[in-house]
Amino acid sequence: MAIIRLDALRGLELAITCAIPELIGRVCVGQADAGHHQKFPSLQIDPKRWNYFPDQAMETYEPAPNAVVMNVGRHQAEIEIVIGAATLFERYALEQKLLDLFLSTPMHPGVLFAQITACEALGPFVAAWELDSDEWHDEKSFSQEFYSHVTVLGTIPALVTRRGVYTINQLHTGLNLTPNPTDGILPSFAPPGVEVVQVNSDGSITPVP
């Protein structure tokens, strides 16, 4: 499940940087590498504890003829998005662009939907990010560091791959309705002369040459 969470967070990063190009190359997802120094303006996407909520299993994708991906629930987490800037005005401007991104969703203002296609093994899925709260942190203002903390609730599907699963594309059966000579009424299915037919989805049958 760790990979699908990371792909979802990368999808959130992509959505934000498409809306705020000045943050391209300045986003840190999760914990930064050792020795990493973030330059302003910057943005950090920091997921908190993930919670799992089970649902009725539902098939969503077939990665191979003998495998199927099932949606068995959803993962939810509190995501903290931290904007860093060297001036107050820059922080205000970046935060406004971020809020505009979430509030511009038609019919669902405050919820950002991201189509995730990076995880080929599990197929495409949709991650949802719901705007919750925002606050300013000015403790380091004398060092020309201004931060805005925006909290969102992230929801992604819980996907699992089940193998050894096969899909029936065609169903063939053999028919022999030769009358039973013992009573002349009930049919028998003994060879020879078995006719092979295909059973269609509507219940009808079609002879197989």
Image (tube, rainbow, N blue to C red):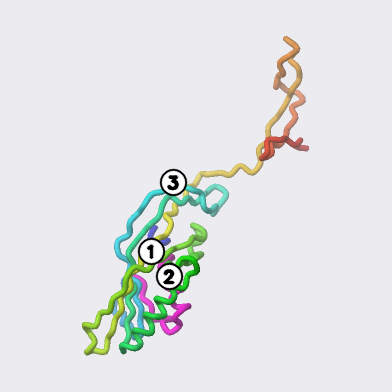
Q: Is label 1 in contact with label 3 (beta carbons under 8 Å)?
A: no
What separation in Å lies between label 2 and label 1 (alpha carbons)? 10 Å
Query: 10 Å neighbourhood of mark 3: few (<14), some, or many (≥20)?
Result: few
In what element is the residue under mark 1? strand
Q: Is residue 187 magenta?
A: no
Query: 10 Å neighbourhood of mark 1: few (<14), some, or many (≥20)?
Result: many
Q: Is label 2 in contact with label 1 (beta carbons under 8 Å)?
A: yes
Residue 3 x/y as whole percent: 41, 62
Q: Residue at x 34, y 88 (%)?
A: 89
N-term mark: 2 or 3: 2
The magenta stretch spans which residues? 6-30
The amino acid pointed to by label 3 is: Gln
In what element is the residue under mark 2? helix
Q: Quadrant of the C terminus?
A: top right
N-term mark: 2 or 1: 2
Q: Residue furthest top?
A: 182
In what element is the residue under mark 3? strand
Q: Residue at x 76, y 20 (%)?
A: 178
Q: Identify residue for label 3.
A: 56
Q: Identify residue for label 2.
A: 12
N-term mark: 1 or 3: 3
